[in-house]
Amino acid sequence: MTSVNITHIHNSRLTSLTSLVSPQKWLRRMRERRELLGLLNQPDYILDDIGLQRHEITREGLKRFWAD
């Protein structure tokens, strides 16, 4: 029988795993997406001024908090 010991995890993989399960990151995304959807109440000229379109706001704002 062969035994395998994992003694090294590549740093970028560990960072990716950490960011995947980061509650702070999830909460930040939820707040940002909620605020983004709030912009839909603004008139078109305001959205034009900040360079956003309604379909972009909707697409990003409706993403799940775990989606990047």
Image: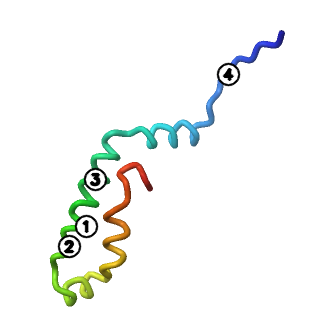
Q: The N terminus is located in which quarter?
A: top right
Q: Which residue is mark 4?
A: 6
- The residue depicted at 37 percent of the width and 69 percent of the height is 59
Looking at the rendered structure, the number of numbered marks drawn on it comes to 4
Q: Earlier in the sequence, mark 1 or mark 4?
A: 4
Query: What amino acid does circle 2 point to?
Result: Leu
Dot 4: element: loop
Q: Which residue is mark 3?
A: 30
Q: Residues within 10 Å of mark 4 (few under 14, many from 20)?
A: few
Percent coordinates x, y for residue 16 in the rendering: 52, 43
Dot 3: element: helix
Q: Earlier in the sequence, mark 3 or mark 4?
A: 4
Asked if 3 appears above or below 12 in the picture, the reply is: above
Considering every residue shown, the one lying at the far right of the view is: 1
Query: What amino acid does circle 3 point to?
Result: Met
**C-alpha span from label 1 to label 4:** 43 Å
Q: Which residue is mark 1?
A: 36
**C-alpha span from label 1 to label 3:** 10 Å
Q: The C terminus is located in which quarter?
A: bottom left
Q: Earlier in the sequence, mark 2 or mark 3?
A: 3
Dot 1: element: helix
Dot 2: element: helix
**C-alpha span from label 4 to label 2:** 48 Å
Q: Residues within 10 Å of mark 1 (few under 14, many from 20)?
A: some
- The residue depicted at 31 percent of the width and 83 percent of the height is 51
Relative horizontal placement of residue 20, taking residue 40 as reference (left or right): right
Marking on residue 39? 2
Asked if 41 appears above or below 2 in the picture, the reply is: below
